[in-house]
Image (tube, helix red, strand yellow):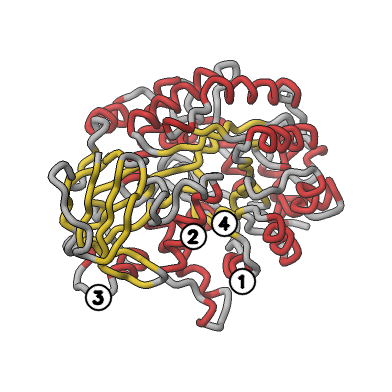
Amino acid sequence: MQTLIRSVLALQNGTLQSVDVLLVDQHIRTVAPAGTIPVAPHQQVIPGEDRLLLPGFVNGHTHSSQVWQRGLIPQLPLELWLANVFDSTPRQLDQFYWGAVSTALDTLLSGGTGLIDHAYVIPGQELETVDALVRGYKAVGIRAVIAPLIQDLPFASGLPKGCLLPQSASPRSAADLLALMEAIIAEFHDPNNGIYIGVGPTGFHRCSDELLAGCGEISDRLNLCYHTHLLETRAQQRLAQERYGISAVQHLQNLGCLTPRTSLAHGVWISEADIALLASVGSTLVHNPVSNLRLGSGLAPVLKCLQAGLNVAIGCDGAASNDAQNMLEAIKLGTILHTVTDSDYENWLTPEQAVQMAAVGGAKAANLGDRTGTLTPGMDADLVLYNLDHPSMLPRTNPLQLLVLGRPTDVVEAAWVRGRQLVDQGQVLTVDTAAMHHHLRYQAFTAKASQVQHHPVEAHYRDVMLNR
């Protein structure tokens, strides 16, 4: 199968140029000046005039099951929000399948060709849950890293002075969870079909050192993405000092958890020393600007990270803390937020940098930087074609700036993942979107959080975080 995209605008060496792009089977074969690749009789030819072609973005951090909690949970700080998330998490395997389909479609139709799903799994049905997610992502055709959320410490342990709270029973032991991860990897890790299993300890705040280090050993041995939450809130920063007496980043380094395969969601409360350490080991920070604002967590020091050479990706986070899965929205907010953190406008993010973070940075976050993220011969054909004639992309000024800083809607005209076309003329070719909307509309879902009552930990949280 060969596809020739002719005379299309593309970002080459930091500038927009008109090029021809030839796709052969799974890969990008040739990128050449416009009009220089001859048309062969067996090729699919796509006119690229008035179009923009970019490498697909990677949604660097999400929780697909939270599609069912979209618009459900009020504005609360993370620690109180989480209590409501746990109470209203779906429990039916069918919901996990449609959650994956919905997350994949929203990502795809906003410019993403891959994602990292830090996936909740039903206790006692972990393999069945992952199976439902895999089926959903394969149905759409998007590239997916599934990193099951695992923890071996109870909820209260994630709060400063959590030892003062009533303690629930601990989840499964670290040894049991590591054995479970081995079983999930053996059953579902399938790179040849665009499905990857990652190790996904929830975060230092609810994981023992044994579990954190054990996940690191699996990541090292099997070359898997290591994905975890890191210092999302001030409460977590306090907890790290309380528990370790040193930075959480330094503690993870001491455990051997920080490598170029490691991606860390949020990092709102990392220090300059943390940034330097993360950059030196080649790890990735995944910036989730929408959820960080939604939950009042703060602003990640993205400009300082980039200046230090730390790889940065962009994520939507789950729909319970974002209420959407729109990569272009996350990219816009992640670009303009940081103008208020540095008065020197020469340090502000440009649209070109934002696209680089979302594509190249995201691919590296997923441990896929050798396969995807750039419009380069030999790389997998994970590409998105944008319609520059759409009203939201007019007038014809700077199309990249309009895409990143404007309000583009329904502008994804075509998309390919591993050379397979998933979107044509703005329509998804692989799944019945009406069927998905039907399930989201009518499937029974008990929304316990709709009459939300603040969790019993609220008094403790207010005392520890607000009154001291």
Q: Please give the residue where the numbered disc 3 appears in the rendered image.
A: 397
Specify which label sits upstream in the sequence, 3 or 4: 4
Evaluate if marks 2 and 1 touch, with contact meaning CB atoms under 8 Å apart: no
For label 4, the crowd category at 10 Å Cα-Cα, with few meaning under 14, some 14 to 19 and many 20 or more, is: some
- Amino acid bearing label 2: Met
Q: CA distance from mark 4 to mark 1?
A: 25 Å
Q: CA distance from mark 2 to mark 1?
A: 13 Å
Say which quadrant the N terminus sits in: top left
Q: Please give the residue where the numbered disc 4 appears in the rendered image.
A: 296
Say which quadrant the C terminus sits in: bottom right
Q: CA distance from mark 3 to mark 4?
A: 35 Å
Task: Report whether residue 244 is seen.
Answer: yes
Q: Residue at x 49, y 60 (%)?
A: 357
Evaluate if marks 3 and 1 touch, with contact meaning CB atoms under 8 Å apart: no
Specify which label sits upstream in the sequence, 2 or 4: 4
For label 1, the crowd category at 10 Å Cα-Cα, with few meaning under 14, some 14 to 19 and many 20 or more, is: few
Closer mark to the observer between disc 3 and disc 4: 3
Closer mark to the observer between disc 4 and disc 1: 1
For label 3, the crowd category at 10 Å Cα-Cα, with few meaning under 14, some 14 to 19 and many 20 or more, is: few
For label 2, the crowd category at 10 Å Cα-Cα, with few meaning under 14, some 14 to 19 and many 20 or more, is: many
Q: Which mark is residue 357?
A: 2
In the picture as drawn, the residue positioned furthest to the left comes out as 41
- Amino acid bearing label 1: Gln
Left or right of 277 in this view: 346: left
Specify which label sits upstream in the sequence, 2 or 1: 1
